[in-house]
Amino acid sequence: MRYRRQHGNGPARSLWQAERGGGMVSGLLRYHDHRVRDLAAGLCAGRGVSPDAMSVWTAIEHDDVLAAGLARLLLWTDPARLPRLGDEEGAWQLYLRTWRPGAFDRGTPAQRAELRQKWARNYARALGEVQP
């Protein structure tokens, strides 16, 4: 929860680290189901942001309400059930399906393994916060 821009200058913005061309920004604004597109556009209108990828991507760096709403809407687009608490692999698969992280998609096998290990560590920390 430190970075609103990936490592201070990278392609991902907001506390949810969304890229402009990724699912949380461009994906929702162009989603195949008009209900999702309408919800995304309505959220943008409510936050005073034009519903185009550049405007949304720029805004989510500092507008946590917009970013949280889009992150939640992205989860809603996934046809699978949310994984149960403690289902680390299920949460990992949800992350891959919905956020489609570029670091994983473009990564080497070693980089993918490192990202998976990082996910496991962060998941355990998060789980410890909600299940003391």
Image (spheres, rainbow, N blue to C red):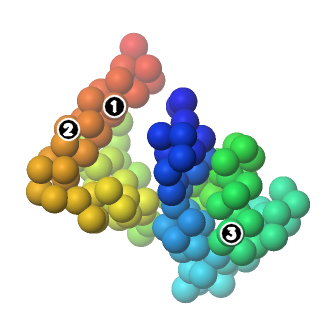
Amino acid, disc 1: Asn
Do the residues bearing badges 2 and 3 touch, measured as CB atoms within 8 Å?
Answer: no
Residue 14 position within the rendered picture, expressed as x and y whole percent measured from the top left: 60, 47
Point out which mark residue 122 bears: 1
What is the x, y in percent for residue 53?
66, 71
Type of amino acid under label 2: Gln
Which residue position holds label 3? 54
Query: Label 3 amino acid?
Result: Met
CA neighbours of label 1 inside 10 A, class few (<14), some (14 to 19), many (20+): few
Q: Earlier in the sequence, mark 2 or mark 3?
A: 3
Q: Which mark is residue 117?
A: 2
Residue 46 visible somewhere in the drawing: no
Q: Position of residue 70 (x, y in %)?
A: 63, 58
Callout 3: few (<14), some (14-19), or many (20+) C-alpha neighbours within 10 Å?
A: few
Mark found first going from the N terminus, 2 or 1: 2
Label 2 residue SS? helix
Q: Is residue 54 left or right of residue 131?
A: right
